[in-house]
Amino acid sequence: MSDAVVSETPVFSVNGLWKVFGPKADRIPADPELTALDPAGLRARTGCTAAVRDVSFDVRKGEVFVVMGLSGSGKSTLVRCLTRLIEPTAGTIAIDGEDVRAMDKSRLRELRRHRAAMVFQHFGLLPHRTVLDNVAYGLEIQGVGKAERRARAAEVVAKVGLEGMEQRRPSQLSGGQRQRVGLARALAVDPEVLLFDEPFSALDPLIRRDMQEEVVRLHREEGRTMVFITHDLSEALKLGDRIALMRDGKVVQLGTPEEIVGSPADDYVREFVRDVPREQVLTVRTAMRTPSDGDAVTGPAVAPDATVSEAIEAVARAGEPARVVDEGRCVGVVDADGLLGVVAGTAKEAV
Amino acid sequence: MAAITAFSPRTVPAVLRHRAVHKLALLVLAAAVLVPLATARWTGGAWPEALTVDLTSPLTKASTWIVDNRDTHPLFLYFFGHVSNAIVLSVRAVYLVLLAAGWAGVTALSALVAWRVAGLRLALGTVAAFLTCGLLGMWVPTMQTLALMVVAVAASVVVGALLGLAGGLSDRLNKALRPVLDTMQVLPAYAYLLPVVLVFGMGVPAAVLATVVYAAPPMARLTALGLRGADHEVLEAVRSLGATARQRLLTARIPLARKELLLGLNQTIMMALSMAVIASVIGAGGLGDRVYQALASVDVGAALAAGIPIVLLAVVLDRVTGAAGSGSTSSSETRRSGWPYALVAALAIAVAARLMGRLDWPDAWTVGIAEPVNRAVDWMTDHLYSGVPVIGGTADWAAHFTTWVLNPLRDGLTWLPWWSVLLVVAALAWLIGTWQTALTAVLSMAAIGVLGVWTPALDTLSQVLAAVAVTLVIGFATGIAAARSDRLERALRPVLDVFQTMPQFVYLIPVVALFGVGRAPAVAAAVVYALPAVVRITTQGLRQVDPAAMESSSSLGATSWQQLRQVQLPLARPALLLAVNQGVVLVLAVVIIGGLVGGGALGYDVVFGLAQGDLATGLVAGAAIVCLGLMLDRVTQPTERRTKKGA
């Protein structure tokens, strides 16, 4: 959110994007009377379904951008529009400033081969190939020679923790291992952006947590830009630098996890985040007050982006209010009352 | 009671709203208008003369023209002539290679392939099968059939795979191909014989082409099915990696369709064998010809000697190609290592046999089973045909069946006014299917009348109906029993497996031995041929009933009879309808072939046409068979049909 980041060209820049399924879909985004209709009305009137409605967002370099919504909210369609696996109906998409919708076939193929790779919900592995050859598949498509692509694939297989399983077939792997293969296949082509389409929703909860941590680790190590689709709020909050919350094809709120939980844009979002343990998402910025002269200078120090629950621990241990210290400067104070207010949800909703 | 009467006014319109009643009411309405018109114009029960079109003279003219111009017309010189020559040459070449390899070489190489593809047990089975063919003195005919098969299967696979590829890749082509292929699969093999004879004359080219036309559809269907059935997400993943259309096809779609492709190969081989045997009627030599000649002179022993190799060939081919389809890929990889050694060993055997001058199967090693079998049949004729106390003899049964079932049925059908037959067809087809299927069924039936073979067609139909009734009674009973007892199912499975792989032609041999010739044996052969498919589909349908539904009904305390009647049978209805459909289609195929053993009617017309060179009669009968097949299929066609044929 600092000025330095904003000045860079976004990896993906999406503006006014529409995807309408149905007969004569083209006319709908252009007609203000039709765009005003709700999904049921649009369907009754034209027989069309608008999966993505006038969506705009930027994905910044190096961030994890999460698109979150319930099934049928259009999030999977949206991510497929980014590389035109589904052809958008209207709007603009740019990757590094280059118009994706204007690309010809071979340029688009280049985009898919080198710049954006996707991980799928049900893995999409080739059952007749070994793990190694599945991972090397993207390189094979690019025309990389056998020895080189296998060597590169072997590295990636090791990176996702599948050493020793190179010669197995997908059918001999567990769900979590298969998704590691899917992840490795996407990583093997060394793409600029990784696109994840609900990659972990077919997995057991424990495996899912492992895989989420794997993604966090990869992101920390490589800093690769990621667009992550999920219907799981806790996954979104855990992974996302920023979250776009979708409903009926529209983005209803776009912001950091803290913004989404701390100040929901409407009742739908509020209902959505109601059960979220707020103290684990909100930072002490929400709970702190400006220091007054009476405050002691002895209390424990916490960083401004520490979560409320971390501050609670510090305050409880010390038995006195904690100081919020940013680059050596005390910017505020959190006490037990302020922290409790956050947990109880009685604190003001503005951040 | 009061409550019930109070409700009854509401139930009456509910009945009327029922779709079946709706359809019937419409039909009755149509009949009320059309029937008086029809009867007023054309009186009498049989198909009115005025409505028939005599195709005999134009067809005769056409066939005479073809015979006259076969050697001069450019179409024949530059197209059909080349096709014909190519076929003759390739069959000849394969045949010579097989002979040059010698019996030891052929056996060893076949065993090698079976071993690599399907394992040791099947390899031993293959050796035993080939040695039996030799022992029966049938080595040369077996090789003739094999040579014809190799060429026909290769052509069928190429044609089928190309059609399937087209259908798999293009929606429009698929839409155009599907109904044609579906229909081709329900038509009796016999219907394909005459058109090719018309163009190519009797002989090997006609036989090979008829086989290709008959055997290519399953390959095409399954190829298209496999290409279309590929996991959507895998294809999307491949696309997301930037694959070109060609890369997608070669690295994903075709490998993903491997199972269907191999199943297609298996079905094509089985259909080709079946047809290669039947095509003996139009001049394909080999095993089929031996059976055909033997049956013509009611020489059961000789027929059996040629029939056993057919069955063995069928079982071996089916098992080996089936194993290739189901074999897991990992095990085939480990087996690949032994290929070179085994190949060398097989070649060594072939060369050794050649050097020892043992190319032809030694005469001294043959066992003539014709003689003893014929003696056994004679004994049966004397002792079992008739006059066995209490149970009567087999010939008596056949006679009774003919007198009490077939004759009344045939007479009844012919006595029925023609329009009522059409009405019944329409009603049945519409009740089970849609108005389109009903329309096709009625038009097909009417076409039979127009062709002027109404009476023989009804004769054939009466045999089909009788055979289907018997098949369904036995088949459903067996199927239900097998679905309820694991033991019975396990015992039945190998029997059904073998029966389902045997070519239709072979079934004629035992029934002739048991019942002599006539219509009853034709019906019996049809029943035996159709039974395995009906039993199998019934059992599968009953077993696939949702276990949760079964569990909930037994938790409510249902007896097993209640469970069967109230849960299993209703839920398995689609499977049972499919069993009926398959039963009808398979029965028709054999009833037609029954023309060879005195079944008469349409089948006989085809054989007669072929034997006498009277192609017009044969072609008309063949067209009527096609119509009858279409009609029977549509009348019994459930709205959704299975992709794979039962046999």
Image: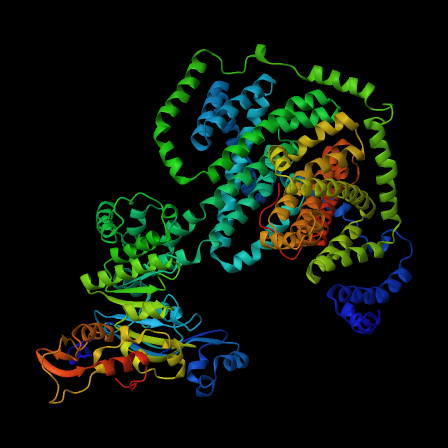
Q: Quadrant of the C terminus of chain A?
A: bottom left
Residue B80 horizontal side relative to residue A72, left or right: right
- Whether residue A256 can be seen here: no
**Residue B414 versus residue A63 in the image, above or below:** above
Q: Quadrant of residue A29?
A: bottom left
Which residue is the extreme one toward the front?
A: A319
In this orientation, which residue lies closer to the viewer: B439 or A298? Answer: A298
Which residue is the extreme one toward the left?
A: A328
Q: Position of residue B406 (x, y in %)?
A: 84, 40
The residue shown at (67%, 30%) is B506
Q: Position of residue B121 (x, y in %)?
A: 49, 26
The residue shown at (51%, 45%) is B159
Residue A308 horizontal side relative to residue A83, left or right: left
Residue A250 horizontal side relative to residue A291, left or right: right
In this orientation, which residue lies closer to the viewer: B266 or A215? Answer: A215
In this orientation, which residue lies closer to the viewer: B413 or B153? Answer: B413
Q: Quadrant of the N terminus of chain A?
A: bottom left
Q: Position of residue B491 (x, y in %)?
A: 62, 33
Colouring style: rainbow
How many numbered marks, from 0 up?
0
The residue shown at (39%, 21%) is B345
**Residue B440 versus residue B345 in the image, above or below:** below
**Residue A162 versus residue B378 in the image, above or below:** below
Residue B562 horizontal side relative to residue B549, left or right: right
Q: Position of residue A173 (x, y in %)?
A: 36, 48
- Whether residue B523 can be seen here: yes
Q: Quadrant of residue B381?
A: top right
